[in-house]
Image (spheres, grey):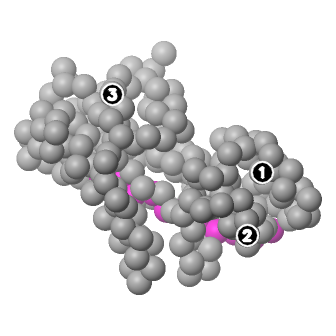
């Protein structure tokens, strides 16, 4: 299976960058699925179901490949924060996280249909924001594109402006927990990275 390339089932440039930085050779195939958005479900269940939905949709078209999909949400108190719908919602999201600690949940699903193997896992990271003024928060949003990011912020783009502390996996906050993923690919699928 080492000769069979990986597929990253994601349109996220951040996830692609993480895979490239880790030294993997892979193809990007964006899944054509409608993600589940059900506030009645726990954030852990929601991210896992969406990751599985994306992985299985792409794996159906590429049964002989190893497909990796992920889903990331931000949890503030008991509220899941996905991608904002507009600038007003983006500002409301970062304002609600301002000066507080929240959790970033990422679920990953790795599917190899030919092997009959599907592995799922979740990683949670605590992120604490600095206390900023409204003007500073608005300025931060001029530095990044908040609309395609869960919680309307980006750890990897000017994260030092807004983040005081990260406890746990940094790559998880970016969108793909590489430490755990690399272990799963190596032990479950026999795939090693080739870091430069």
Residue 19 shown left or right of residue 78 in the figure: left
- Which residue bears the numbered disc 1? 141
Q: Where does residue 192 sit, x and y in percent of width and height?
A: 31, 27
| Nearer to me, 180 or 21 | 21
Q: Which residues are magenta?
A: 99-109
Q: Earlier in the sequence, mark 2 or mark 3?
A: 3
The question of residue 107 being in magenta is answered with yes
Q: Where does residue 144 sit, x and y in percent of width and height?
A: 72, 44
Disc 2 vs disc 3: Cβ atoms closer than 8 Å?
A: no
Viewer-nearest of discs 1 and 3: 1
Mark drawn on residue 92: 2
The residue lying at 16 percent from left, 39 percent from top is 61
Q: CA distance from mark 1 to mark 3?
A: 31 Å
Mark drawn on residue 27: 3
Q: Earlier in the sequence, mark 2 or mark 1?
A: 2
Q: Quadrant of residue 123?
A: bottom left
Residue 164 shown left or right of residue 69 in the figure: right
Regarding residue 187, the answer to whether it shows in the image is no
> Where 34 falls versus 29 (above or below)?
below
Q: Magenta stretch: dominant SS?
A: strand
| Nearer to me, 10 or 122 | 10
Q: Where does residue 11 sit, x and y in percent of width and height?
A: 44, 40
Q: Where does residue 157 sit, x and y in percent of width and height?
A: 70, 40
Q: Earlier in the sequence, mark 1 or mark 3?
A: 3
| Nearer to me, 194 or 151 | 151
The residue lying at 48 percent from left, 15 percent from top is 196
Disc 3 secondary structure class: strand
Regarding residue 51, the answer to whether it shows in the image is yes
On-image quarter of the N terminus: top left
């Amino acid at each position: 299976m080492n000769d069979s390339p990986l597929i990253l089932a994601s349109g996220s440039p951040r996830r692609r960058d993480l895979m490239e930085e880790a030294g993997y050779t892979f193809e990007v195939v964006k899944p054509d699925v409608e993600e589940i958005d059900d506030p009645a479900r726990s954030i852990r269940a929601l991210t896992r179901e969406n990751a599985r939905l994306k992985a299985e949709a792409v794996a159906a078209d590429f049964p002989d490949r190893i497909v990796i999909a992920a889903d990331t949400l931000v949890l503030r108190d008991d509220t899941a924060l996905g991608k904002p719908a507009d600038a007003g919602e983006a500002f409301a999201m970062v304002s609600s996280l301002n000066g507080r600690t929240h959790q970033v949940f990422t679920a990953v699903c790795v599917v190899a249909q030919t092997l009959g193997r599907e592995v799922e896992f979740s990683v949670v990271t605590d992120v604490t924001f600095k206390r900023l003024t409204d003007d500073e928060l608005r300025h931060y949003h001029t530095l990044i594109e908040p609309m395609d990011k869960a919680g309307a912020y980006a750890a990897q783009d000017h994260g030092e402006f807004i983040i005081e502390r990260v406890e746990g996996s940094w790559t998880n906050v970016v969108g793909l927990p590489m430490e755990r993923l690399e272990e799963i690919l190596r032990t479950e699928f026999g795939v090693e990275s080739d870091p430069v």
